[in-house]
Amino acid sequence: MAGLDFEKPIIELEKKIQELKTFHSEKKIDLSSEIKSLEEKLEITKKDIYTALTPWQRVQIARHPQRPYTLDYISLIATDFVELHGDRLFSEDLALIGGFARIEGQKVMVLGHQKGRDIKENISRNFGCAHPEGYRKALRLMRLAEKFDLPVVILIDTPGAYPGIGAEERGQAQAIATNLMEMTCIRVPIVATVIGEGGSGGALGIGVADKVCVLENSYYSVISPEGCAAILWKSSLKAPEAAEVLKLNANELLRLGIIDEVIPEPLGGAHRDPQRTARILRETVLKHLKELRDMSKEDLLAARYKKFRNIGVFTE
C-alpha cells in the first residue's frame, strides 16, 4: 500500500513484520514472540500518528490514491445501480456520475464526483473536476428524483469545478449558481457526504443538502490549501499553513456549524478498510434519511433554507 511521508514509521514496521512472517513460514523458525512485539509496537505507532494528525496531513489522506471513490462506495452500500448519462444540453461528463439505486431496499437517486485510478481514467474523468454539463446533469437527476419522490444521496470528492476556457464559455459559474438556487427548492430529502476532497464551488455545486456530513479525514473548503497559499504567500509551499488557517478539517467544520456530522474512519483512513467505512457511511445516510422522511415538504425546505442562511452569521 502506498504511504504518505508521515506514515514512514508505520510502513517500515509493517514491512519488518511481513519479512519476519515470510522468514517464519519459509524457514520454519518460531518468531511468534518477535512478530507479536512488533505488532504491538505497530499499533502504538499508528495511534500516536493518526490521533495527532495536522490539517495538512488530513488533506493528504483525503487525496490518497487508494482512497475509495464514489463508484466504490456505491458498489459497497447500494444495489441495483443504474447509471444515467448526459445533461440533455451539451454532452456527458464522466467527472460527475449518478443514477437510480437501492440502499437496503430504500430507493434513492445517488450521485457524486468520480476520479480515476490511473492516468487514462483520470484524463477521461478530468481528475474529478466537473464541467458545467456535469452540474446540469446532476440537477436533471435531482429533478427526476423529485418527480418520483426519491431521496437524493450525494458523495462529494473534487478539487474543484474545472476552470478551463471551454467550461467557462459553456457557463460554469452559471451552472453552479443555478444548482445552488434550485437545490434549495428540491422537494425531497437530500443527504450529502464529503468522502475525500470538498473543493470550492465544485463541491458546493452539489452540496446544498438537508444534512451535510464529512468523513473524518476529508476536507471541505472555499479554496484548496495550495490555492490559498499562492494568493496569500505567493508560494504553494505554504500549503500546510494555509490548511491550518482555513479550518477545513471535519471537526473544525462541525464546530463552526458548517456540517451536521463527522463520520469516523478506520485508523489510518478509509483506504485501510473500505468495507468498514462503507458500513458506517450507509448507517449514517439511512439514519438521516429516516429522520428527514418524517418531515413535511414545507418543513423540509424551510429547514434547508435556514440551515444555509445561518452559515456565517455572528454577533458582536
Image (cartoon, rainbow, N blue to C red):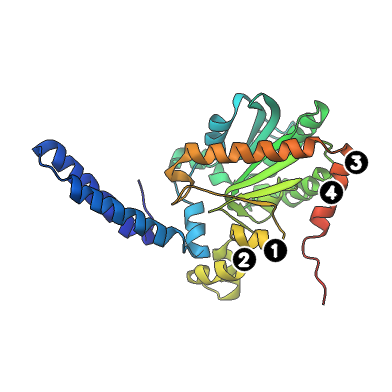
Residue 31, given in percent of the width and then of the height, sits at: 15, 45
86 lies left or right of 121: right
Q: Position of residue 273 (x, y in %)?
A: 45, 41
Labels 2 and 1: the sequence-earlier one: 2
Of callouts 3 and 4, the N-terminal one: 3
Q: Is residue 105 above or below residue 272?
A: above
Query: Is disc 2 in contact with disc 1, using a CB cutoff of under 8 Å?
Result: yes
**Which one is nearer the viewer's eye here, 269 or 135?**
269
Q: Is residue 15 left or right of residue 91?
A: left
What residue sits 50% from the left and 63% below the top? Answer: 56
Does residue 189 appear in this view?
no
Mark 1: which secondary structure?
A: loop
- Numbered circles on residues, count: 4
Q: Is residue 269 visible?
A: yes
Q: Which residue is mark 1?
A: 256
Q: Which amino acid lies under the numbered mark 2 shown in the image of this protein?
A: Lys
Q: Is residue 66 above or below residue 106?
A: below
| Disc sitting over residue 298 in the figure | 3
Instruction: Give the position of the N terminus as an image quadrant.
Output: top left
The residue furthest front is 33
Find the distance from the CA under tag 4 to the CA under tag 2.
25 Å
Mark sitting on residue 247? 2
| Residue behind mark 4 | 303
Residue type at tag 1:
Leu
Residue 299: numbered disc: none
Between the C-alphas of marks 4 and 1, the distance is: 18 Å
Query: Horizontal placement of 37 versus 138: left or right?
Result: left
Q: Pointer 4: residues within 10 angstroms few (<14), some, or many (20+)?
A: some
- The earlier-in-sequence mark between 4 and 2 is 2
* Disc 3 residue type (three-letter): Glu
Q: CA distance from mark 3 to mark 4?
A: 9 Å
